[in-house]
Image (cartoon, helix red, strand yellow):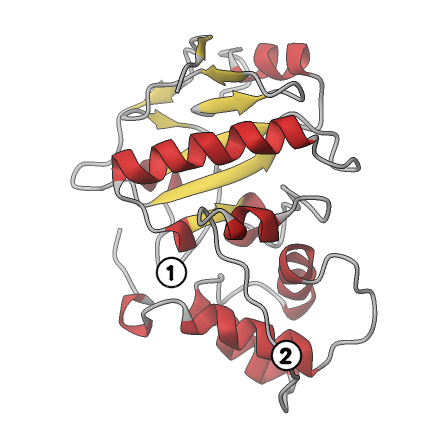
Amino acid sequence: MEFVKHPSPNYGLRRAGTEIDFIILHYTAMSTKKSLERLCDPVHEVSCHFLIDMLGTCYQLVDENKRAWHAGKSYWRGYKDLNSRSIGIELVNSGNDQFPEVQIKSLIMLLQHLLEVHKINPKNVLGHSDIAPSRKSDPGRWFNWKKLANYGVALFPEVSAPMGCDKQLFLNQAKCTGFDPDANFEDILRTFRNRCRPNFTGEFDGYDCALMQKFANSFNIDESSNSQ
């Protein structure tokens, strides 16, 4: 896959002994021009490995083997330094708009490439909101996780019936999946619905729990606690 090189000075070395296990998806909330300026400005100390604009052009800002600064304070399955274990992809989008088909097509191609090269499991393609539900919403409710799953580059749980459930059971399932155990119920529910039930605004119900259970079942419980 071809990339437009647009080097950012904002990167470092990955933590010793870590592997690239995850891919984290973001939206920029600003234009392509402003996004590239921000991600390459040493004053702001943020970056990503790749940025895909709304026309599908893919820019490479940081070498995949380097540690870009995109995840911030985050948590997933016991890991806290997600920057050392992930590749960050920014999508140019305001957060309130549909993602153009050409942009998603380019993303799918990039994910296929990265998953193959780095031997990453598609279940480890996550949103920024998955790893930081209390402070982040990207890639947001307009992002089509199901389409990525149809191409085998992400996970999208589907169920046909609800299950008996309460808030504590939902949180327990979320913890088994990998969510931060310190995150509150409302933040995890909002994040999870953006991914799995983006058009549903009703009360918490058994479908939320059934979907979270399906999501949790896709992960090995033995991996739920890891050291940095």
Marks 1/2: CA–CA distance: 27 Å
Residue under the point 70% across and 66% down: 186
What residue is pinned by disc 2? 160
Residue 16 versus residue 91: which sits nearer the camera?
A: 91
Q: With 65 as the anchor, is 32 left or right in this view?
A: right
Amino acid of disc 2: Ser
Kindly report which numbered mark, 1 or 2, lies closer to the viewer in this rendering: 2
Q: Are marks 1 and 2 in contact (CB under 8 Å)?
A: no
How far across and down, in percent of the image, does residue 214 sit? 50, 73
Q: Can residue 162 be seen in this view?
A: yes
Amino acid of disc 1: Arg
Locate the N terminus by quadrant: top left
Residue under the point 66% across and 74% down: 208
Q: In this view, does 116 lie above or below 11?
A: below
Q: With 141 as the anchor, is 24 left or right in this view?
A: left
What residue is pinned by disc 1? 77
How far across and down, in percent of the image, does residue 83 sit? 38, 37
Residue under the point 45% across and 71% down: 216
Instruction: Name the residue at the left extreme.
Output: 17
